[in-house]
Image (cartoon, helix red, strand yellow):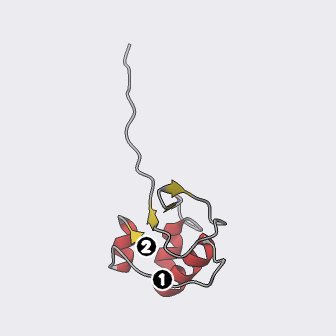
Amino acid sequence: MKLLGYFSQITGKREEKVTLDKGSTVETLLQVLISKYGREFRDAIGRQGFREALIVVNGRKVEKDHVLSHGDEVIISFPIGGGGVTRIL
């Protein structure tokens, strides 16, 4: 699993291996990480924060009910947003 941006700051890690039971979901993974890293991680995920984390599994954005498989590459980050083009008339 890769932790990008603020998530790597909270955990002090950019990568971490997590072992889960077969049939575990992204939500299960997040609960494990919240138990390990605490309130700051929980708030950053979006439960009580102002923005929601982006969860990507094998290159695809997924929801928290997505079932994980052995060997999946999981990335947790915030969506990267850019500016827009402003047109002045």
Q: Position of residue 16 (x, y in %)?
A: 40, 79
Amino acid type assigned to the residue bearing label 2 in the image? Met
From the viewer's side, name the closer residue of 89 and 25.
Answer: 25
- Mark with earlier residue (2, 1): 2
Q: Is residue 73 above or below residue 82?
A: below
Q: Position of residue 76 (x, y in %)?
A: 46, 66
Residue at mark 2 to residue at mark 1: CA–CA distance: 7 Å
Residue at 61 percent across and 77 percent down: it is: 28
Residue at 67 percent across and 66 percent down: it is: 65
Q: Is residue 65 above or below residue 81?
A: below
From the viewer's side, name the closer residue of 70 and 15.
Answer: 70
Residue holding disc 1: 18
Quadrant hosting residue 30: bottom right
Q: Position of residue 62 (x, y in %)?
A: 58, 58
Residues at marks 2 and 1 touching, judged by CB atoms closer than 8 Å: yes
Residue at 38 percent across and 42 percent down: it is: 82
Residue holding disc 2: 1
Amino acid type assigned to the residue bearing label 1 in the image? Val
Q: Residues within 10 Å of mark 1 (few under 14, many from 20)?
A: few
